[in-house]
Amino acid sequence: MSGDVLLAEHVYRETCSNIRATDDISFKLMGIVPLLSGASFLTFFLKEKVPVEAGPVIVMLSLFAALVTLGLFRWELRNIQTCSWLKRRAEALENYVVTEARVPKQPKPPRGIGKTEAEKWIYSVTVVAWLSIPLMVSQLGAQPSWLISVYIVFAILIVVFTVLSALGDIRVRPGAQIVVCR
């Protein structure tokens, strides 16, 4: 075997290892974020009645949790982009090393819903769920008008950024080149 082929095989192995690492991070976050959010929701909803005085705390906690979830979502979109780039690189290396073999291509996701779409749904739903807590458990109408205004402005901004993030196309197309920065 030539040195170029050996180098390509080494890079291919490392690329596949990096793909597994990005997938591992994604699956851990997709399990932890909804689980912790669900546990928090249950805590709020299982209480008999939330006192009016707790309204500001609930609003701030809700906005904080939605922002943290949105931040994790944005980070995860970059992780998906990196994984997409790594998959394109692996395909190119496969074409280089196995030029004559008829290796099957990776199948398309069922109904067009794969890892990327699933993560967009999970994070978007979690953000919206966090933002719905003040509407469901606190007497928001009994809160000071400044608090309601702050909540509405921030909730709208968070929803807009979440929608923009979910609708954005972050996949790396074949032939595209990006620089991976961490």
Image (cartoon, grey):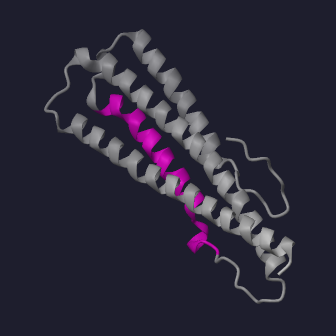
Please state the total of marks drawn on the protein image.
0
The residue located at (56%, 74%) in the rendering is 110
Dominant secondary structure, magenta? helix
In this rendering, position of residue 80 left or right of residue 134:
right
Q: Which of the 4 image quarters holds residue 114?
A: bottom right
- The image shows residue 96, relative to residue 22, as above or below, that is below
In this rendering, position of residue 109 left or right of residue 146:
right
The residue located at (50%, 57%) in the rendering is 24
- The picture places residue 66, in percent across and down from the top left corner, at 45, 33
The residue located at (72%, 42%) in the rendering is 181
The quadrant in which the C terminus is found is top right
The residue located at (66%, 76%) in the rendering is 106
In this rendering, position of residue 135 left or right of residue 104:
left
- Residue 111 counted in the magenta span: yes
Q: Nearer the viewer, residue 170 or 113?
A: 170
Q: Nearer the viewer, residue 146 or 162?
A: 162
In this rendering, position of residue 83 left or right of residue 26:
right
- The picture places residue 171, in percent across and down from the top left corner, at 71, 56
Magenta extent: 108-136
- The picture places residue 165, in percent across and down from the top left corner, at 62, 43
Q: Which of the 4 image quarters holds residue 113?
A: bottom right
Residue that protrudes farthest toward the left in the picture: 48
- The picture places residue 71, in percent across and down from the top left corner, at 54, 35
The quadrant in which the N terminus is found is bottom right
- Residue 30 counted in the magenta span: no
- The image shows residue 134, relative to residue 14, as above or below, that is above
- The image shows residue 123, relative to residue 176, as above or below, that is above
- The image shows residue 62, relative to residue 57, as above or below, that is below
